Amino acid sequence: MRREVRIGLGFVAAIVVLGAGSMFVDRHATVSAATVMAPRFEVDPMWPKPLPNHWVIGMTIGVSVDAKDNVWIIHRQGSLEPKEVYQIAKPTPAAECCTPAPPILSFDQAGNLVKSWGGPGAGYDWPDSNHGITVDYKGNVWIGGNGRGPQPTPVAAETGVTAEASTVTAKFKDNEILKFTQDGKFLMQIGKPDQSKGSNDLANLKGPAKLTIDPKTNELYVADGYGNHRVIVFDADSGKYKRHWGAYGKTPDDKDQGPYNPEAPPAPQFRNPVHCAELSNDGLLYVCDRSNDRIQVFKPDGTFVKEVIIAKNTRGDGSVWDIAFSKDPQQKYIYLCDGSNEKIYVIQRDTMEILTSFGDGGRQPGEFYAVHGIATDSKGNIYTTETYHGQRVQKFVYKGMAPVVKKDQGVVWPKKG
């Protein structure tokens, strides 16, 4: 009898120990889940400072940060409505305000305007619709463009052919990229307006969206773009062609793939626009296939590495607009701007897992309307630009690492105190 009691007590004790161990494991798992860390940001609603001279900016479609942490943006003067620029009304000004700012503007860390220039000039073809800006490791300023110019006329509706089927392939006048000094001195042009022969043309672009320069090889990678379906590489000093490729590293073609369908298998080619090409420190090229809702990753020679789909059910303008890397040496995080869902995703680069996101649609600081471009400075701060009627640049201050408590943070307004 005593032996049975002892055995019973031992069994109960074992259960208690196992239960305690189980609680420890559960508690540990909960703590681990709660301590996933990610970079945290707050919008700076006072940055940048007001522009001088009654200047206003239009669609703001590019942002880059130079080696001195100056922030460069480019905007479209022609996108401003007549009532926004009464000061330049013809034949006489209609009011005291306002006038378009020069297309290229640079701000210091305090938000002061430090440089302003740009527009048509001798020796180069300024884009009809400028797009993207990059300041390279030598301090040179590069831009692209996606102006279409006059378009072919579709077949008349009364023929019975649907509008989609009858539309002639869209033209793109802007088939060039331009290189300047930081003071606006023209250095080089690659490509000529109205000359593109398609996605395997080695001399011209077609609606180039954005570019990046590899400081190790001095090679220029172009996301090309709004008319073509490829990445193309040039020597950044001579402009000499090096190589190009399409989705999955294949030879690109210009066959119409029809509208994006989230239920269909991944598209074998990039859709328009191929919207960004960003090179990481460890030599991987991240390409924004915007309308396909995906990032594709390549080696510098065009070898396909992997892809990830972001917000798969996003139609319309797509979800993958532009990316920037965190400023730690390993570039552990990707910041992806999504101008359709109006948010910035924080992605762990090695796994391509979305850790959290911030932002929302709206006009107030920390909200977005068509967030289009993104860049980071040496301190880890994020800068974003907005196209369409967004028409602004915003700064999001890096506040260090923090536990992820919400997958979608909404507006990251400054905390009191």
Image (cartoon, rainbow, N blue to C red):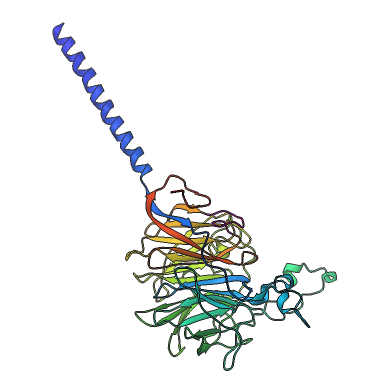
Toward which corner of the image does residue 160 lie, by quadrant? bottom right
Does residue 252 show up? no
* In front of the other: 107 or 271: 107
**Residue 81: % across, % down:** 71, 71
Q: Is residue 36 left or right of residue 110?
A: left
Above-or-below relation of 276 to 26: below
Magenta segment, principal secondary structure?
Answer: loop
Q: Is residue 198 left or right of residue 376?
A: right
- Residue 65's x, y, as percent? 45, 72
402 and 352: which one is in front? 402
130 or 393: nearer the eye? 393
Quadrant of residue 341 in the image? bottom right
Whether 173 is among the magenta residues is no
Q: Which residues are magenta?
A: 359-368
| Picture residue at 82% right of the left edge, 73% below the top | 156
Q: Quadrant of residue 399?
A: bottom left
Counting from the top left corner in percent of width and height, residue 397 is at 44, 59
Is residue 266 found left or right of 347 in the rendered image? right
